[in-house]
Image (spheres, rainbow, N blue to C red):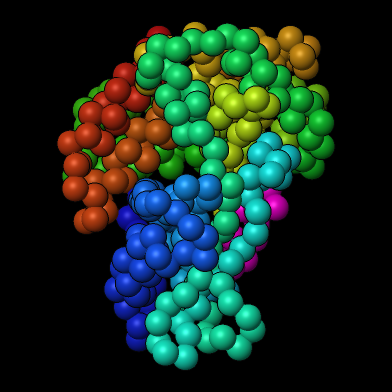
Amino acid sequence: MKSLQCSGETDQWQELNRKVAFLQKADSYPERTSKIKSVETHMSWVFLTDEHAYKLKKPVDLHYLKLCSVEARRLNAEKEIQLNQDLAPGIYLKTIPLILNKEQKLQIGGHLGAGQIVDWLVLMKRFPQDETLEQKILRNDLNWSQFKEAAQLISQFYLKAEPVNISGEVYCSRLEQYVRENYYALSQKRYGLDQGEIDRIHSAQLECLLFGSEAFYKRVFEGRIIEGHGDLRPEHICLSSPPIIVDRLEFNQELRTLDPVDELSYLTIECSFLGYPEVGEYFMHVYREITHDQVDERVIGFYRSFRSSLRAKISLWHLDDERVLNKEKFKKKAALYLSFAKKILE
């Protein structure tokens, strides 16, 4: 997933470095804080004060996301706040301008006319990072009553969601397109994967779509295709009381348009990656119990294999980013995801 530099006279990545350096200093903030912890993701930087998180979007230029302008980043930030209210109420607070003031110094916020707005920050209330589902699994702290609360939260969210107006033909065509995109990316020689294995996985997924098309059409007919979370991973589920689910995918409506069983299959794969597939299975069980969804097991198998291939592709994309240093980690991740994709459909 190569982050391309936006075109223009100004080197926005150099400007980003300046902003990051400023936001890493505790005295840059309008609130008192003992320290700043910064976390870099592929799409943004997050700066943690004692009570809040400030998210700064990167000026990425990708085929599915273009944040080259200050205005584009503002709109993206506002969309993120709007979309996360249902699953994380009280966490996403507001956008705050990052200003270059009249002394040519950066400052967070300020009155109109204080200077030039050079970027926007998403202000969030901090939540306990050590209480995420990911951290619970890593500590082998499996509190099933907490898991049930979180599973009920996402299941009720799915239950209340309006079905998306999409035909079975369009939905299946979209799934086939995603499968072929995964195959194309995974087949790139520079990644050094076993092409025979990639071919077998790809053929099995297409065969599942072809011979199981009735089951997928049925999902559409039953109104199961909705706007979901879009990136339901263990690190995005906080098992606080009440639980919250953060980082709903804001930048692409199509990627949020999915089958809840697809999304929960994705969660199961991520739990499997952490060594506890039964946690993801439990979320699926609670969902099916609440919604009375009698999903065909072949559909679940396809979703899990497809999502494993997708995660392998995303892992490999990191090898194309010159800013990623530990490339071996992502090679190993891709290999493990591919082993999941192959095993599921055997």
Residue plotted at (58% across, 47% down): 125
The picture places residue 289, in percent across and down from the top left corner, at 74, 9
Question: As drawn, is 100 to the left or to the right of 260?
Answer: left
Q: Residue at x 35, y 86 (%)?
A: 9
Q: Is residue 337 visible?
A: yes
Magenta stretch, residue numbers: 72-83
**Which is the main secondary structure of the residues drawn in magenta?**
helix
Q: Nearer the viewer, residue 221 or 84?
A: 84
Q: Is residue 340 above or below residue 184?
A: above
Q: Residue at x 63, y 45 (%)?
A: 91
Where 2 falls versus 97 (above or below)?
Answer: above
Image location (x, y in percent) of residue 258: 65, 35
150 or 331, nearer to the observer: 150
Membership of 332 in magenta stretch: no
> Measured along the vertical axis of the image, is residue 113 above or below residue 295?
below
Quarter occupied by residue 112: bottom right
Q: Residue at the spot x=40%, y=82% of the render?
A: 105
Coordinates of residue 1 in the picture (x, y in percent):
35, 50
On the rendered structure, is 91 left or right of 1?
Answer: right
Query: Which of these two is toward me, 145 or 309?
Result: 145
Could you tell me residue 259's position as x and y percent? 66, 29
Can you see residue 262? no
Residue 74, magenta (yes or no): yes
